Amino acid sequence: MPTFIDESGDTGPCSRGGKAYFRLAAVWIPSHADAGAFREDVRRLRLRLHLAENYEFKYAETHRAPDRRNEFLLAALAYGFRFAVGEVDKNHADWIDAPGSAQHWACVTELAATLRPVYEAAELQAGRLLKEPVVVDDNGDKHFLSLVKQQFRALRSPINPAASLVGKVLFRGSSPDELVQLADMVCGAAGEIGSRWWDLIADRCLP
């Protein structure tokens, strides 16, 4: 039951040209088999849309190609993925001067807390430790990766409280992984609540 995390926006202050938000999205998919099947579906989708084998589906780059965005998200909806989103509004008084580390902490902590009951339910249903792997889009920031490890691996197993719910936490580039690309798509749609893209996936959002 892997989780995939991607970000959008930035942590720089708006007064210095930073975007108005920093956002993280985490996509959870029920099984490794589902993950593999989705990847194969996306590879077939590239063929059907006459795209290069290494074409990377990205929300920001499909505004003028809505058919690509639509087909990609419809392919994902065939699987039982769920997602969580953490966001910082840097125009809010509490966040105007907040350092990047605080923004990272807030969003990562929110994702871990939101996903915890999903992990717990999956583990109890399986009746064994699952050691959920967490894959983070590689932004080159080792401190950020360490924070994700710290917050997610702090989640305790309901079967064995001495064990973590989460296993390996690692960086992976988005180009070779269709599920990191799904996290990117979800992150983009979360920035356009009320759009057709958000409406398409909104019922998969965790409370």
Image: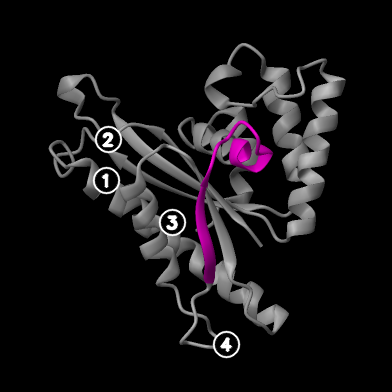
Which SS class for mark 1? helix
Q: Is residue 78 visible?
A: no
Type of amino acid under label 3: Leu
Residue 49's quadrant in the figure?
Answer: top right
The residue carrying mark 1 is 103
In the rendered structure, which disc, 4 or 3, sits on the residue that comes first in sequence? Answer: 3
Residue at which label 4 appears: 159
Q: Which region is colored magenta?
A: 166-182
Q: Are marks 1 and 2 in contact (CB under 8 Å)?
A: yes
Lateral position of residue 51 relative to residue 28, left or right: right
Rate crowding at label 3 as few (under 14), some (14 to 19) or many (20 or more) other CA atoms within 10 Å.
many
Give me the residue at 40% from left, 56% from top: 148
Contact, mark 4 vs mark 1 (Cβ under 8 Å): no
Q: Earlier in the sequence, mark 3 or mark 2?
A: 2
Question: In the drawing, what numbered circle is on residue 11?
Answer: 2
Magenta stretch contains residue 144:
no
Mark 4 → mark 3, Cα distance in angstroms: 22 Å
Residue type at numbered disc 4? Ile
- The local secondary structure at tag 4 comes to loop
